[in-house]
Amino acid sequence: MYIACIHLIRIFAPELQSRVYNSSSMKDLIQHQGIIERIEKHKVFVRIEQKAACSACHARSACLASDKKEKVIEIDDTSGIYAPHEQVVVSAYSSTGLFAVVTAFAIPLILVVVALIAGLTQSGNEGVGGLAGLFILVPYYFILYIFRDKLKKKCVFSLSKVQDTYDLNQSL
C-alpha cells in the first residue's frame, strides 16, 4: 500500500518528487535543491525549481507537456547557520507529499463529484449540479484556511546544506 502511494505521487504529482530515496528505516524522502532567497526571524525562504517528470527528457523543447516552475518554500529554522543566496537541500518525507496531494486534489475532486451528482439528482438541472460542485469548494478551502497552522505542523520540511547531504543512491 505504501509503495502504491509513492507511485501515485510519482504519476499525479511529479513536481513533489524530484528524488526519492530509500533509507534503511524504509522512509522515503523527497529532496529538492534550492537557493535561500531571504531569512526573516526564524523563517528561511528557499526558492526551488519544480520540474515535471519529463523535464529531463531530451525532447522536452518539442513537447508541450514539459513544465518548469519556481516555488518559494517557507521553512522554520532556529539554527541561524544559513545565509541568503546559499545553496541548500529541502527535504520532506513522502508522506508529507502524499498528504498534500490528498488534501489539495483528491478530497476536492471527491467533493465536487458528490456535489455535482447530488445537485443534478435533486434539481434535474445540469447547471444547478455544476454550481453545486463549484460552490462546495468554498467552504472546503475556507476550512483549510482556518486550520492552516495545524496543516503547517503536519507538512514539515527540513533544511540542510548541500555539502552535508548524502546521496543514498550511491549506497544502494
Image (cartoon, rainbow, N blue to C red):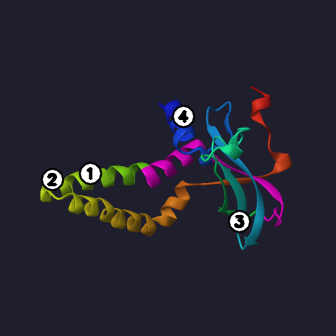
Mark closest to the chain's N terminus, 1 or 3: 3
Viewed as shown, does residue 124 lie left or right of 161? left
Quarter of the image holding residue 118? bottom left
Q: Quick check: 7 above or below 103?
A: above
Q: Position of residue 1 (x, y in %)?
A: 47, 30
Q: Which mark is residue 45?
A: 3
Residue bearing the label numbered 4: 7
Give the CA separation, mark 2 to mark 3: 48 Å
* Nearest to the observer: residue 74 or residue 56: 56
Picture coordinates of residue 167, whole percent (x, y)? 78, 37
Instruction: Give how far apart the Cα atoms at labels 1 and 3 are.
Output: 38 Å
Of pointers 2 and 4, the one earlier in the residue sequence: 4
Disc marking residue 114:
1
Number of residues whose C-alpha sits closer than 10 Å to that of mark 1, classed few (under 14), some (14–19) or many (20 or more): some
Mark 2–mark 1 CB contact (< 8 Å): no
Q: Nearer the viewer, mark 1 or mark 3?
A: 1
Instruction: Check disc 2 and report its element: helix, strand or loop.
Output: helix
Quadrant where the C terminus lies?
top right
Q: Amino acid at mark 1?
A: Val
Label 1 with label 4: CB-CB less than 8 Å: no
- Whether residues under marks 1 and 3 lie with C-beta atoms below 8 angstroms apart, the answer is no
Reply above or below: 168 against 124: above
Looking at the rendered structure, the secondary structure element under dot 3 is strand
Residue type at the position of mark 3: Phe
Which residue sits furthest right?
Answer: 163
Q: What residue does disc 2 label?
A: 121
Residue stretch rendered in magenta on the structure: 80-105
The span from disc 4 to disc 3 (Cα, nearest Å) is 29 Å
**Separation of disc 2 and disc 4 at Cα?**
35 Å
